[in-house]
Image (cartoon, rainbow, N blue to C red):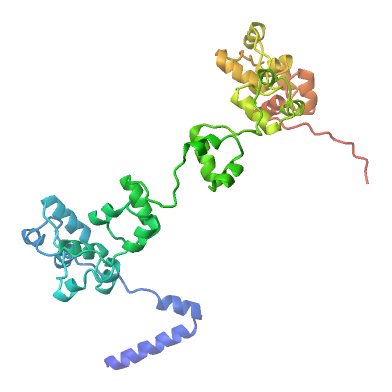
């Protein structure tokens, strides 16, 4: 009987669905069943407070292991360990005798790469074991090597110690040891007397020295050139600075323009034509009477110059009293173009246009007569 009723219900559902469209069938099939009543069950959650057994694990194993056992985050475990003042525990791979014997034979970075250890751990273990860094890229200087510095040339000591020439030279200079260069010639008094009598090139050729060596020696002794190409400035020439443009003065004095400009700047002479008229008491009295634009127009100055002067004097701008709009003026709004009304009322176009918008008056539109088709 139950099977017959189910078959009959299935036939009626099939017959009902045959009359519906595909979209309706999909909508009916996507409907959820009737919501069932949820049971109020208690959700088990991990308490936020640290338990005794959790605190007992801190410090006995690495933080990440404690975090896995307690189900807490690594940051939470590490923060709790800091609060308790407990030292961290790290898993350090023990050194084997073969690894210790390997230290010093190669650079520390190469050993760290081969042993899959950090560079700091390898360096600390080698130093702790007392193994010298004989294969390292940086060799420390010994006391025996320092005593030999200066006894021979830097190139000879570099070949003897198997070091670079720059390393030997820098170490010797750092210790303040003079160079024992056999090719270095000390300057004699006859050679010093020759400096300044001839050009540096001629002196270097006669003494068989470098031009740079002759130049440095002459500068250190404070000896000038015999025939300098630089002409010294006279008092009369200094008095002409700033009296005319630098280009014109350079032609007059037969000097380069750059030399004239540099001389003027060193003497702190202002450039020609840059002197502005000074502010007079009569000009300062105008600040309390007129606006910046009016003062600039009367005095022939820029607006920024007048504004800066007013700021330095501390004089506020004069009060500009606003003309109130009268009822007769309001009645004229919209009766003519804004430009014509502004000219008639002696107001600005922006003032007329803004007041008309504020009053909600439409603009003037000129209507032409209809002439027909």
Q: Nearer the viewer, residue 129 or 340?
A: 129
Q: Is residue 196 visible?
A: yes
The x and y percentages for residue 86 are: 11, 54
Q: Quadrant of residue 46?
A: bottom left
Q: Position of residue 11 (x, y in %)?
A: 40, 89
Q: Where, by quadrant of the figure, is residue 345 drawn?
A: top right
The x and y percentages for residue 24 are: 47, 77
Q: Is residue 207 left or right of residue 27?
A: right
Q: Position of residue 136 (x, y in %)?
A: 29, 65
289 or 64, which lies in front? 64
Q: In the image, what residue occupies the spot 73% across and 20% down?
A: 347
Above or below, 200 against 251 in this view is below
Compared with 123, 96 (above or below) is below
Q: Could you tell me which residue is drawn at 76 percent across and 27 percent down?
A: 248
Quarter holding residue 228: top right
Tell me the residue at 57%/34% (across/down).
196
Residue 335 in sight here: no
How many marks do you count on the picture? 0
| Residue at the image point whose x is 31% and y is 53% from the top | 149
Image quarter in which the N terminus is found:
bottom left
């Amino acid at each position: 009987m139950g099977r017959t009723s189910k078959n009959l219900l299935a036939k009626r559902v099939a017959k009902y669905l045959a009359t519906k469209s595909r979209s309706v069938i999909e909508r009916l099939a996507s409907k959820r069943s009737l919501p069932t009543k949820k049971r109020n069950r208690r959700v088990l959650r991990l308490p936020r407070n640290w338990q005794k057994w959790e605190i007992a694990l801190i410090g006995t194993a690495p933080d990440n292991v404690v975090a896995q056992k307690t189900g807490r985050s690594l940051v939470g475990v590490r923060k709790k360990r800091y609060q308790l003042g407990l030292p961290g525990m790290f898993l350090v791979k023990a050194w084997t005798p073969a690894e210790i014997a390997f230290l010093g034979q190669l650079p520390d970075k190469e050993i760290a790469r081969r042993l899959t250890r950090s560079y700091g751990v390898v360096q600390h273990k080698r130093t702790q074991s007392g193994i010298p860094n004989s294969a390292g890229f940086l060799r420390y200087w010994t006391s025996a090597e320092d005593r030999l510095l200066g006894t021979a040339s830097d190139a000879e000591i570099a070949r003897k110690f198997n070091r670079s020439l720059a390393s030997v030279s820098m170490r010797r200079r750092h210790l303040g040891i003079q160079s024992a260069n056999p090719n270095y010639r000390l300057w004699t008094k006859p050679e010093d007397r020759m400096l300044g009598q001839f050009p540096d090139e001629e002196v270097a050729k006669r003494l068989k020295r470098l031009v740079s060596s002759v130049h440095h020696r002459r500068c250190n002794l404070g000896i000038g050139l015999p025939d300098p190409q630089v002409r010294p400035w006279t008092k009369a020439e200094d008095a002409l600075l700033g009296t005319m443009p630098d280009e014109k003065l350079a032609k007059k004095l037969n000097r380069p323009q750059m030399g004239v400009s540099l001389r003027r700047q060193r003497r702190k002479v202002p450039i020609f034509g840059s002197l502005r008229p000074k502010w007079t008491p009569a000009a300062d009295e105008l600040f309390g009477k007129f606006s910046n634009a009016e003062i600039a127009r009367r005095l022939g100055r820029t607006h920024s110059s007048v504004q800066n002067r007013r700021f330095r004097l501390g004089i506020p701008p004069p009060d500009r009293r606003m003309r109130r709009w009268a009822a007769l003026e309001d009645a004229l709004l919209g009766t003519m173009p804004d430009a014509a009304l502004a000219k008639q009322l002696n107001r600005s176009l922006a003032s007329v246009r803004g007041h008309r918008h504020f009053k909600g008056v439409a603009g003037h539109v000129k209507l032409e007569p209809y002439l027909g088709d």
